[in-house]
Image (cartoon, helix red, strand yellow):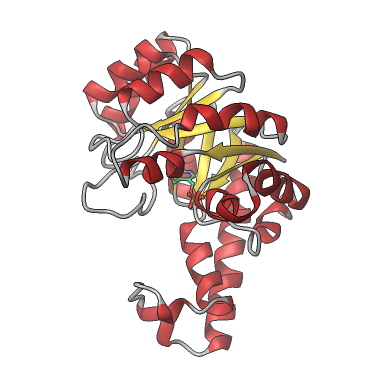
Amino acid sequence: MLLGVNIDHIAVLREARKINDPNPLDAISICKLAGADQITIHLREDRRHIHDKDAEIICKLSPLPVNLECAIDEEIIDIVCDLKPMRATLVPEKREEVTTEGGLDLITNFDRIEKAVKKLHKNGIEVSLFIDPNKQMIEASSKLNVEWIELHTGSFANIYAMLYSNLANTHHTIKELELPRDELKKLLDKSKKEIKKAALKAQDLNLKVAAGHGLNYQNVTQITSIKAIEELNIGQSIIARSVFTGLEKAIKDLKELL
Ligand code: PXP
């Protein structure tokens, strides 16, 4: 299974002081050395971590293929078309969110997304859509003629964390936290089944399948068991571990689990 390492959180650390260090570009040769297959970055409309200059330099110099996540916003799509990463992943964006919450609504935004996909294709950029694992979204993805879909695993990861980590002591105020453990186990099983079903449906429609969000060293093997998924994009857990182990080891440890 392929691994895209999302390096946004290196820029998050830099932005804590608004200086030059650590520079996400410096991470890329380490990612390559450690066996990563792709670099993923998100150029957000609010530029809270990755800046235009980062995206420009990374797209120009990265020895690994770049997967650039962006919103369906005309100005951003034009920037992405100029940068020409290997792939653009279209994601929903809300300014107040801590991280990307939920997948794209391909039904309500069909025309806007279609326009963005056509523009990206015209510029030689392959397109992925970040969607929730459900049939309606997979069918709409197929109609949009994209190469890839990325299944949002955030909901699965949240349930996993509620079951197996001390999430009650974090900032989360998720109502499911009050559910009994056997209910949570059923929800986790349901969530995994939804991901698997969506991945198989996408495969049937000749879409390449990636997945990501909230995946970590504990929960990832539940997703790697789904053979229709070809690639995972993982960020926060790798960068968090790298603080203690170094980035190369953090990536190698994860690669071993794939
Ligand atoms: N895939 C997509 C589309 C994302 O938006 C993100 C978060 O930026 C990730 C993967 C990685 O998520 P995480 O940092 O939780 O591993």
Query: Which of the two residues, 212 or 190, is positioned nearer the viewer here?
Result: 212
* Residue 57: % across, % down: 43, 17
- Residue pictured at 45% horizontal, 32% vertical: 23
* Residue 202: % across, % down: 58, 40
Residue 125 is at least partly visible in this image: no
**Quadrant of residue 104 in the image?**
top left
- Residue pictured at 63% horizontal, 47% vertical: 246
Query: Which of the two residues, 7 or 146, is positioned nearer the viewer here?
Result: 7
- Residue pictured at 75% horizontal, 53% vertical: 257
Query: Which of the two residues, 243 or 70, is positioned nearer the viewer here?
Result: 243
Query: Which of the two residues, 229 or 110, is positioned nearer the viewer here?
Result: 229
Q: Quadrant of the N terminus?
A: top right
Q: Is residue 4 left or right of residue 14?
A: right
Using the image, determine if residue 107 lies above or below residue 237. Answer: above
Using the image, determine if residue 115 lies above or below residue 185. Answer: above
Residue 19 is at least partly visible in this image: yes
- Residue pictured at 47% horizontal, 18% vertical: 59
* Residue 80: % across, % down: 36, 19
Using the image, determine if residue 116 lies above or below residue 219. Answer: above
Using the image, determine if residue 217 lies above or below residue 75. Answer: below
Q: Is residue 148 left or right of residue 42?
A: right
**Quadrant of residue 22 in the image?**
top left
* Residue 108: % across, % down: 26, 42
